[in-house]
Amino acid sequence: MKRRLLLLSGTAATAMLVGGCASQQLDSYTAEKPVLDLQQYFNGTLDAYGIFTDRSGTVVKRFTVVMRCTWQGNEGVLDEDFLYSDGSKQRRVWRITKLPGGRYTGTADDVVGIAQGQAQGNALNWSYTLSLPVDGKVYEVQFDDWMYLMSDTVMLNKATMRKFGVRLGEVTLAFTRRAP
């Protein structure tokens, strides 16, 4: 048992080291346009289309999201309704706070603690821990979430999920803003 724990912890440490070396830097998006302003983009109703892929790249779930987004000053609410390909539904309500210097914080009922985000140029990088229900159990998984504004109406999102530093899979989304 001790040998198995040592092997697992060694594997997790190696994964964290390798993952840390390969991570992208937000600074490389500073000059990219259009400039992402969350208050402007996440305002009104948006539709999103997404997939979850496992470690091998196999699509495990497909889903759509309808988001109703509002802001009062620097405080935003992103009310998300998920519909999964298996017919199941989920709702998440993000409460976002805009801080100086392109920084953001966020909370939601299934987010452990406070999400931390930073925007530069056309990109936003979020980091947070999510309580994820799977087969009757709840796991806390870490998200490294990247959003890229492509145009006034389209944003792409790619998030990597990890547990103990081991990559579990990815979530890929395309957001589209509805016309006012």
Image (cartoon, rainbow, N blue to C red):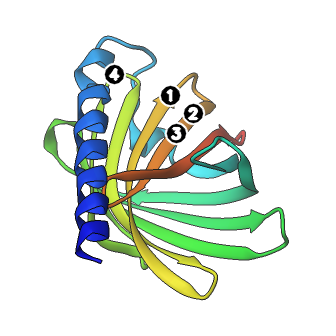
Gap in angstroms between the C-alphas marked 4 and 2: 13 Å
* Pointer 3 or 1: first along the chain: 1
Q: Count the marks.
A: 4
Tag nearer the camera, 3 or 1 = 3
Tell me which amino acid carries mark 4: Gly
Mark 3 to mark 4 CA distance (whole Å) = 17 Å
Question: Is the residue marked by circle 3 packed among few (<14), some (14-19), or many (20+) residues within 10 Å?
Answer: some
Q: Residue farthest to the top?
A: 31
Quadrant (top left, top right, bottom left, bottom right) of the C terminus: top right
- Camera-side mark, 2 or 3: 3
Q: Which residue is mark 4?
A: 121
Q: Mark 3 to mark 1: distance in Å? A: 12 Å
Mark 1 vs 2, N-terminal side: 1
Q: Amino acid at mark 2?
A: Met
Disc 4 to disc 2: CB gap under 8 Å: no
- Which kind of residue does numbered mark 1 sit on? Leu
Task: Name the outermost residue toward the left.
Answer: 100
Query: At label 3, which amino acid type do we have?
Result: Lys
Determine whether 100 is above or below 133 in the image: above
Query: Could you tell me which residue is drawn at 42 percent across and 38 percent down?
Result: 146
| Residue at 65% from the left image edge and 38% from the top image edge | 174
Q: What label does residue 158 carry, if any?
A: 3
- Mark 4 lies on a secondary structure that is loop
Q: Label 1: few (<14), some or many (≥20) within 10 Å?
A: many
Q: Nearer the N terminus, badge 4 or badge 2?
A: 4
